Amino acid sequence: MANKLAVITGASTGIGKEIAKIAASEGYDLIVVADEPLVDAAGELDSYGVSVEAIEADLSTFEGNDTLLAATNGREIDILVANAGRGLGQGFLTQDPAEWRHVIDTNVVGTTYLLQKVLQQMVARDEGNVLITGSIAGLIPGAWQAVYNGTKAYLDSFSYALREELKDTKVNVTVLMPGPTETEFFRRADMLDTPVGEGEKADAGKVAKDGWDAMTDRKGHVVSGFMNKVQAAISHLTPDSMLAKMHTGQAKPDGVEESKSGR
Ligand SMILES: NC(=O)c1ccc[n+]([C@@H]2O[C@H](COP(=O)([O-])OP(=O)(O)OC[C@H]3O[C@@H](n4cnc5c(N)ncnc54)[C@H](OP(=O)(O)O)[C@@H]3O)[C@@H](O)[C@H]2O)c1
């Protein structure tokens, strides 16, 4: 019998690469996607003896997502891991509009488009499993990372909304909510000069396993890591103004002057 197929976005590095390894080790054929060549990731995945197709596509665009969908050649997608995402630190007023737009287009617009297309196919077959990489950042107004946290609030919420809409089908939607994780994320987001960028982080393999297990157990969400579970629980009980202030303590770049307003 042919292997089942898992499509994993953002699989060149970090959490997505680790999820791809788990999927391959469980016998799934893979289509892995990133917006740069996936030579290293694909080479590593080949050793699992499953078929691996590496697609280079910019998932911030509809066209990039269509390229990915075309690569399935009509084959049924059993698992979709919608993981590709970009961070962006620093104060909002100094951010380049092209950069914050790319974050929204990748994390929100492209992901939403891909989910709609794949979920339409899955619901038509009444079968399928989806893991969306959200974040505990989505629970916290992200001062000094404001656009990014907004995109993750969208994904955390969107995932539960889809789950409810699909509850009478056999299609599952799970959201993985990691906390700070050791990947390329903070360097790419220009956040290495922040307390969270400099601080200790979770292992990407452990986060990936938590997400994979939650999806295969068909859970609504998983917050990866004990301290992140505590932080997520606290966020539900804490006023947004206080959460935003706490986030400043984590994401404000070193050397940026204290606010003079006293707020
Ligand atoms: N690291 C953390 O602390 C953390 C915490 C919570 C949630 N997350 C989320 O976890 C997910 C994975 O991030 P990561 O931490 O593993 O970071 P990462 O190492 O930077 O990986 C991001 C992946 O997404 C891909 N990607 C980004 N924009 C893309 C685009 N427009 N088109 C196609 N692929 C794109 C990247 O591909 P290229 O290499 O080709 O650019 C890369 O494979 C993201 O959604 C992130 O928001 C991360």
Image: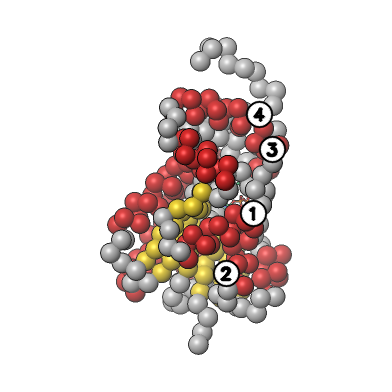
Q: Is residue 29 above or below residue 96?
A: below
**In this orientation, which residue lies closer to the viewer: 231 or 145?**
231
Badge 1 amino acid: Ala
Judged by depth in the image, the label closer to the viewer, 2 or 4, is 2
Q: Which label was assigned to residue 199?
A: 3
Q: Residue drawn at (58%, 74%), measured in percent from left and top?
A: 26
Q: Position of residue 13 (x, y in %)?
A: 65, 57
Please give left or right for residue 9 compared with residue 175 in the image. Answer: right
Badge 3 amino acid: Gly
Residue at image mark 4: 253
Label 4 secondary element: loop
**In this orientation, which residue lies closer to the viewer: 120 or 224?**
224
Label 3 secondary element: loop
Label 2 secondary element: helix
Q: Position of residue 126 (x, y in %)?
A: 33, 72
Residue at image mark 2: 23
**Distance CA(mark 1)–CA(mark 2):** 15 Å
Q: Would you identify the image quadrant in which residue 256 lies?
A: top right
Q: Residue drawn at (52%, 40%), measured in percent from left and top?
A: 230
Sequence-earlier tag: 1 or 2 = 2
Sequence-earlier tag: 4 or 3 = 3
